[in-house]
Image: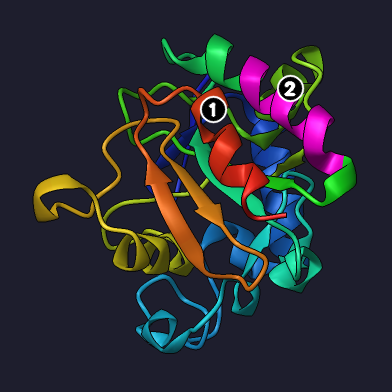
């Protein structure tokens, strides 16, 4: 596979590079270049009160305001293509979404390559993969969820719902946050928690 280095990250092939360059011309945020207000290194996220105050770039390169989730229970999850949890998590997330979409449930998934390099492809590759998986919930562009380059949303989520023993960092792929209809994170689920265990908590939010 041909690899192309862009801002410290390898894109899978020239086609991915062309897509990334095209998105950059349309919206510099997609490659992490943006005004100080929205940069990942900004501390503005500390002042946010609800999930709805954030935005992110979707898998097609469009900047999306999370106002779209207002009044809807939402699962936020970091995903990966080649993880041991991939098959079961995508299957059960799809099932939950199909079962409760009509009652307002939404899922916002964020591909991330920080755990074992298990999401190595570009957004084009990821989109093709989720198409094969029959995914219909919202998929966003690949991001960092830990470290200085973590997107503001994840810095905020980790602060709102910390991890065990006081370690707030995301431990692995498929860490799940459940957000209520007021835009407040109410529970954090570990990577080894199958999505179906969330069902009672989801039902309590309707």
Is 83 or 162 nearer to us in this picture?
A: 162
Instruction: Evaluate whether residue 141 shows in this view.
Output: no
Asked whether disc 1 touches disc 2, contact meaning CB atoms under 8 Å apart, the reply is yes
Judge by depth and name the residue closer to the eye, 203 or 56: 203
Q: Is residue 86 left or right of residue 190?
A: right
Location of residue 59 with respect to 87 vertically, above or below: below
Secondary structure, mark 2, is helix
Q: Residue 88: image x %, image y %?
A: 55, 12
In this figure, which residue is indicated by the disc labeled 2? 95
Going 63% across and 20% down the picture, which residue do you hit? 92
Q: Position of residue 198 (x, y in %)?
A: 53, 35
Q: Main secondary structure of the magenta part?
A: helix
Residue 57 visible at all: yes
Write down the region rendered in magenta.
Answer: 91-101
- Residue at the spot x=56%, y=24% of the render? 196
Outermost residue, right side: 102
Q: Quadrant of residue 189?
A: top left
Q: Nearer the viewer, residue 64 or 2?
A: 64
Residue 57, numbered label: none
For the image, the number of numbered tags is 2
Q: Is residue 25 left or right of residue 120?
A: right
């Amino acid at each position: 596979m041909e690899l192309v280095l862009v801002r410290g990250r390898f894109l899978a092939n020239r086609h991915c590079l062309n897509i990334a360059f095209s998105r950059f011309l349309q919206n510099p945020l997609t490659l992490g270049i943006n005004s100080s207000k929205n940069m990942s290194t900004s501390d503005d996220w500390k002042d946010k009160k609800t999930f709805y105050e954030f935005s992110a770039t979707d898998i097609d390169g469009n900047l999306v305001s999370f106002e779209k989730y207002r009044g809807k229970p939402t699962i936020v999850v970091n995903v990966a293509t080649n993880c041991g949890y991939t098959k079961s998590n995508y299957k059960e997330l799809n099932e939950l979404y199909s079962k409760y979409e009509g009652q307002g449930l939404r899922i916002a998934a964020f591909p991330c390559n920080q755990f074992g390099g298990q999401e190595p492809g570009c957004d084009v590759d990821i989109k093709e993969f989720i198409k094969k998986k029959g995914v219909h919930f919202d998929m966003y562009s690949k991001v960092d969820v830990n470290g200085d380059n973590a997107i503001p949303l994840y810095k905020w989520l980790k602060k709102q719902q910390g991890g065990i023993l006081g370690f707030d960092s995301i431990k692995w792929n498929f860490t799940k946050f459940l957000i209520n209809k007021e835009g407040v994170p109410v529970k954090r689920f570990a990577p080894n928690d199958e999505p179906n265990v969330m069902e009672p908590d989801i039902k309590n939010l309707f």
